[in-house]
Amino acid sequence: MNKAFTFKNCGWLIAVLLFSSLSASFSYAGSARSSSITHWNGECSGGTRTWWDDMCMAWRKRMGSKGWSQWWVNYHLVRVGRYVDPTIAAWGQDKWNLDGGDAALMCTHGGYDENGWYGVMHTKDHGQCRLNVSDMKIGPYLGNGKNRFWHMSSCNSIRWNLLGKWWGPAAGRVHVITGFHGYMYIGSKYVGEYRDLAKYGFSSKGVGKVWRDKMHHVHHWYNSWKTVCPISLGFGYSRATSANALNEKYKWAYSNKNPNWMTYTWKSGCDPTGGPKLPN
């Protein structure tokens, strides 16, 4: 069963979910961008995952087949300065990297602490091997990006008890952020799922809802019978617009909105490895 709630960005007020009838009636071709690492053989450490770049590439190439331009930075080029917003650190270059695309996918090891998710980089940059949530502001605010859809193929990227940490990056006016509560998995059998994210993100339900459904697993043999729990976040200036952000397709371009409200959606009762069971 799919579940969703809406929060206002003041005191974490739970509100009733409202759906908007707003929609876009035009087709839009943008830029799909990705970053991935398979071997951590630089200054930063991480376990080898040989299929991760294939997963990222499958999504990006399918986006390209829809008329979107493609851009990627992989392996030793994945370093923190590329993903930090210049309003947070003057050396940040995100607007020329993933945040410079309309949709982006990052494939890297992830962890969490009290400050939220962090993504493990390949090469140390400005003394850092981790990209932290506090380094990020995603989207077009102040001309420092244009991202609408930010995807993370990374463990613990949207940890249930740390959902509120994504208000900071969302201040850049990104529309949708997607990730995982608990562990996610890497391998040849997942390549098609990332391809399907692009496919169905154009043709069926909104991108946020496709992520929730296509990335969800319950005891599949090819991930050693593990359960995977995706979560999608939609942002907007009202309850309705934040809920409706989860209906936005890649081929549409909703207007950029102040992130006053967040709607999040998940699979009811999903119980992953690496995290507590989600609410029913």
Image (cartoon, rainbow, N blue to C red):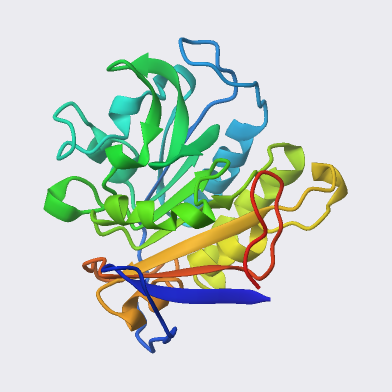
**37 w.r.t. 162: above or below:** above
Query: Horizontal and vertical percent for residue 39?
Result: 59, 18
Viewer-closest of 177 and 279: 279
Viewer-closest of 102 and 26: 102
Q: Residue at x 64, y 21 (%)?
A: 47
Marker count (numbered) = 0
The answer, for residue 152, to whether it is visible in the render is yes
Quadrant of res 1? bottom right
Q: Residue furthest bottom?
A: 21
Quadrant of res 271? bottom right
Viewer-closest of 195 and 17: 17
Q: Which residue is drawn at 38% across and 32% down?
A: 131
**79 w.r.t. 270: above or below:** above
Position of 102 with respect to 51 (left or right) is left
Position of 221 with respect to 189 (left or right) is right
Query: Horizontal and vertical percent for residue 89?
Result: 18, 31
